[in-house]
Image (tube, helix red, strand yellow):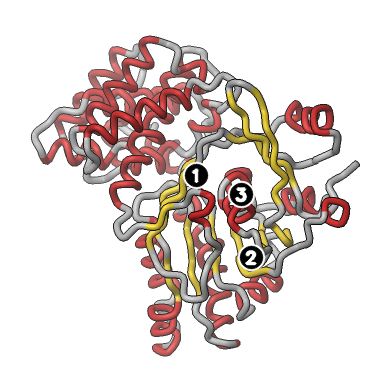
Amino acid sequence: MRLDRDELDRPSAPVRIVHMGLGAFFRAHQAWYTTVADSKNEWGIAAFTGRTSTAADFLNTQDCLYTLIKREASGDTSTIISSISAAYDGNDFSRFSATVADENVAIVTITITESGYTANQASAISKLTTALEIRRIKNGAPIAIVPCDNIAGNGALLRSLFDQTTSTFSAESKEWFKKSVSIVSTSVDRITPATTQADIDLVEAKFGYADASPVVTEPFSSWVLQGEFPLGRPDWELAGALFVDDISAYESRKLWFLNGAHSLMAYAGLSAGYATVAEAITDPQIRALVDAFWNEASEVSASNKAELDGYQAALIERFANPRIAHKLEQIAIDGAVKLSQRVAPIVTARSNAAKESPASATLVAYWIRFITNNSEFKDSRSKELAITLQSTHVVRELIAVIDPKLSTDDHFASLVEEILSSLSTTVKG
């Protein structure tokens, strides 16, 4: 038996949300929040894929329904997610622009990953800008745009990209983008490992139906939002979302403590032969590195100590969940972009306070060792990194790829070089 809306009495809700980037995280996060919050079935999502149509093709074979498997240490529970009313190939711009321009659509959410705002902005952001311009011309209805990626100040970044891509538009259009396009900043969190064939097989064996596209996730979830929704929104707070006036402390806490630790475990853990976060965190040396990194971040964090202590304790429990196979190889992708968000702000803040950052330097050193020893590393800036790896002063220039200003910190660069040398690399200094 396949998932079927008629058999399950799960009619599609009218489309009022458009989503860009039909990946596992979106389906474990925003789509889940909407399913939980939308008891009246009023907020359907039209989801558009990224590079290929594969994710939409799978969903369309089962009425856009899928299983969310919540994987706890004690066992699995499942929920059928029904908030996606339609799934489309993201390369179908005609369909995308017509959907965004529909006056009934109130929200566009985005998960295009950190690199999507740099390497792919010409396609993803420009496509959205053009679709919004068509909306302005067609009906002029206001709309909320909600970026849901691990980027500090994601709302401000998206606004600046809109300003760039509309620079040649008419004065009337620029004014509409400024007044009618509300950009909502967010902080998102839910560990969502890649789905495996074993997960697909499990659904049929345990729950009694076939699902070609289940999603596995952890019990924990967080969604913090700051901004306005001119045409309304689902009651996401019913599923635990938090609406705040200032999101900055939530952003830095998540990026530094969760994501920063993830990057540290990825590069140090892969070096030690581990495959998953759960394996890496059990290593006393890696745990000590994580604690040291957190201590550095804590000293420049805007969050209070009691709050951070509780957050870190919860993170250790999440990391140690042996049934969440969060692959270090997956986390290691796009290190250049990720470290600019997860490490550079910590080091800069500490340098401004005349504090050394040996744990942060250790993370950067492990990253340099990783890309040096893995010729086929995956990074949206791989061409730039490959050229930099051939330069005379590799360490300093790789730090500049992460953050140009950070590379001018002579003491930090020397610290990275010293630690890298102790890791027995052959990188030129």
Instruction: Judge whether 53 appears above or below 340 on screen.
Output: below
The disc at residue 32 is 3
Q: What secondary structure is found at the residue carrying circle 3?
A: helix
The image quarter containing residue 219 is: top right
**Residue 380 placement (x, y as % from top left):** 50, 44
**Residue 124 placement (x, y as % from top left):** 55, 61
Instruction: Judge whether 378 appears above or below 113 on screen.
Output: above
Mark 1: which amino acid?
A: Ser
Residue 102 in sight here: yes
* Distance in Å between CA atoms under marks 3 and 1: 29 Å
Q: What secondary structure is found at the residue carrying circle 1?
A: loop
Disc nearer the start of the sequence (3/1) = 3
Mark 2: which amino acid?
A: Trp
Residue beneath label 1, please? 380
Neighbour tally class for label 1: few under 14, some 14-19, many 20 plus, Cα within 10 Å: some
Q: Residue at point 72% right, 61% down?
A: 85
Q: Residue at point 32% right, 40% down?
A: 253
Residue beneath label 2, please? 43
**Residue 353 placement (x, y as % from top left):** 10, 38
Residue 88 in sight here: no
Neighbour tally class for label 2: few under 14, some 14-19, many 20 plus, Cα within 10 Å: many
The image quarter containing residue 165 is: bottom left
Q: Are marks 3 and 2 in contact (CB under 8 Å)?
A: no
* Distance in Å between CA atoms under marks 2 and 1: 34 Å
Mark 3: which amino acid?
A: Trp
In this rendering, position of residue 35 left or right of residue 287: right
